[in-house]
Amino acid sequence: MAGSGSAQDEGLIRVIGTGALSLSVVNLVVGAGIFALPGLVAAGLGSAAILAYLICSITVALVFMCFAEVGSRVTRTGGVYAYVEEAFGNFVGFIASILFWFGFSALADAAITVVMVNSMAVVFPIFGETIPRVIFIATLLSFLAVVNIRGVRAGVRLYIFNTLVKLVPLLLLIGAGLLVMDFNNLVIREWPSATSIGASTVLLFYAFNGAESALSTSGEIKNPARTVPLGLLFGLCGVLLLYVGLQTVSQGVLGPELANSTETPLVAVATEIFGDWGGKMLIAAAVISIYSTLSGDMLAGPRVIFASALDNNLPKIFGKVHTEFKTPHVAIILYAIVVGVFAVSGTFKYLAVVATGSLLLVDLGVILAVLRLRRRDGLPAEEEFRLPFGPLIPILSFIVVGWLLLQVPSGEALSIAILVGVCAAGYGIRSILAAR
């Protein structure tokens, strides 16, 4: 096996603590989705929309309890890729690395970059034109790449600042909304069917994606056995409270009209509470939120490329560390280029669905890694995090994630299958050439 689960001399610096990891989780999860999903979920479930959040939260909690155990045992850089590779070897690890950094992280970032530029074009129509659009995307990604190349501390400071900035208008909306909302709008007058709840939960799952990326910096996390479980717990609890608060306020302020606001529901809520300036504030918040998520992913995504190169699954040049700044600068540059190319050429819906499907496959690999590592290496050590109830939580997580994968549309599922096939073929060719 190429890697070891314990920390290795990768040339990186461990500077990320529990607070920074928790904020990274919040930052990477709270992206573009939450600005549209309250209306979409309400359209499917009405005033019972909160049920989808609770079910989705339980699902995410099950999955990330598995991440917490594996993450406390495997502490080298790469996060979910390293977890899968440690459990199942180079071949499966190689596929997981491509699915994660390319199929999920890069395509998801390209998708939200499309949303960001489209949102700005509403206020500044020039961003609807091709050349200004390309220039803006190239400039934005170049800036984020340079900041992250100059040091992990600079990258951490940037996403912490951006996270706090993007949370302010959302928390302001919740606080003001609680004062003016009509609590009668929260009464569930008709219970939805199980089918409707399931469909809305799958839709909402997109808004809970991204916490996996925060673990890609595992080689720069201090005391991973303690920091990873606590960082995930605090971060996901913060996301749940924020999401439930936004859905509650939206339902309480708009009532049945929320179901008709499927494109910009939070803008509609802010306009109802604050007037026109409130709507503009939420448009700005959406742009800031996406920018913040991009800044966090530019820190996390390249670490998967870097880790895969260290394991000889990608060209060694991507495993280089900058002599002065101690960051994987070549991997950062590659990641920025890939995101930029797909942001210029792709559309949001297709990119988002393929990204979600790719992530679910990787999640499945991490869930199975819990069982594999327990069988091979025994239960986690006393200082590491151990899931309660034996294999029950991994089995339940496997069933839920498997069910979600079955909801991926056939066209996007075919794209994911082709990506997996290309990865397998590429690995086989690389192995043949290496043997000569």
Image (cartoon, rainbow, N blue to C red):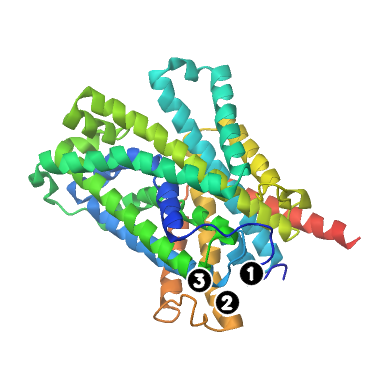
Q: Give percent across and percent down for residue 407.
A: 44, 53
- Relative placement, left or right, of 176 versus 355 is left
Badge 3: residue crowd in 10 Å (few <14, some 14–19, many ≥20): many
The mark closer to the camera, 3 or 1, is: 3
Q: What is the quadrant of residue 427 in the picture?
A: bottom right
The residue identified by callout 2 is: 373
Question: Which of the two residues, 15 or 80, is positioned nearer the viewer here?
Answer: 15
Q: Give percent across and percent down for residue 133.
A: 54, 22
Label 2 amino acid?
Answer: Leu
Determine whether 396 is above or below 94 in the image: below
Disc on the earlier residue, 2 or 3: 3
The residue at 30%/59% (across/down) is 55
Q: What is the quadrant of residue 436 in the picture?
A: bottom right
The residue at 39%/47% (across/down) is 207
Label 1 amino acid?
Answer: Glu
The residue at 39%/46% (across/down) is 30
Instruction: Identify the secondary structure beneath mark 3.
Output: helix
- Relative placement, left or right, of 433 versus 10 is right
The residue identified by callout 3 is: 225
Q: Which mark is residue 86?
A: 1
Disc on the earlier residue, 3 or 1: 1
Q: Are marks 1 and 2 in contact (CB under 8 Å)?
A: yes
